[in-house]
Image (cartoon, rainbow, N blue to C red):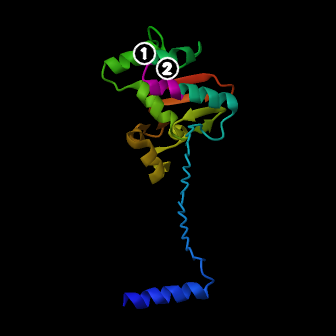
Amino acid sequence: MRLVAALVVLFGMAACGGSETTVTVTESETVTATETETVTETETTTTREAVGLPPRVARKHAALLEAAESGDYEELRPLVPDRFSYSFGAQEGDAIDYWKNIEAEGGGSPIQILARILKMPYTLYRGTYVWPFAYDKQQDDLTAYERKLLGDLADDFGQGTGYLGWRAGIERNGRWAFFIAGD
């Protein structure tokens, strides 16, 4: 059998011209797939500007809201003008002292209420922008949605007199005119 194989090889070489050999070269190619990941970052900035306010009123509103949200009455002090209504009766001290006394006596936190009402819609009443919107409404005129916005402040209406709860007003020129409760 070996002899037959050797003869086949010799005859094969003779038929090919003798000394030529065939070499088979195998190439392999490696392809690496690269994935590109695109990451999109979105930064959302929420502004709490009340829509439709004149620029001076909008600036004062934003300053008051920022100071009130700090929870520090002293942040409000530079915003309180000389002519300012904070009480219906004569009080010793200033507005800041008055609000601190209310809080100390367990009457709630005027600064927290100020922050809360300034986040609500406003109304324009005789040239003054007033928060909350209920200022010039009667209790019976409130919609279910408006009652929900007011929450417990919806109980602050006098019989036939309108809203008597805490309210803040800013004049068209940007002067903070009042932050007061009662009648």
Sequence-earlier tag: 1 or 2:
2
Q: Magenta stretch mostly in which secondary structure?
A: helix
Across and down, in percent, residue 4 comes to 42, 91
Badges 1 and 2: C-beta atoms under 8 Å apart? yes
Image coordinates of residue 174 in percent, x first then y, are: 65, 25
Residue 98 disc label: 1
Which percent across, then down, holds residue 180?
Answer: 48, 25
Magenta-drawn segment: 65-72
Q: Residue at x 42, y 28 (%)?
A: 112
Q: Verify whether residue 179 appears in magenta.
A: no
The image quadrant of residue 151 is top left
The disc label shown at residue 86, or none:
2
Please tell me how crowded label 2 is: few (under 14), some (14-19), or many (20+) other residues with Cα within 10 Å: many
In the rendered image, the quadrant that contains the N terminus is bottom left
Q: Position of residue 53 (x, y in %)?
A: 65, 36
The amino acid marked with disc number 1 is Tyr
Tell me what residue is drawn at x 48 percent, y 48 percent.
146
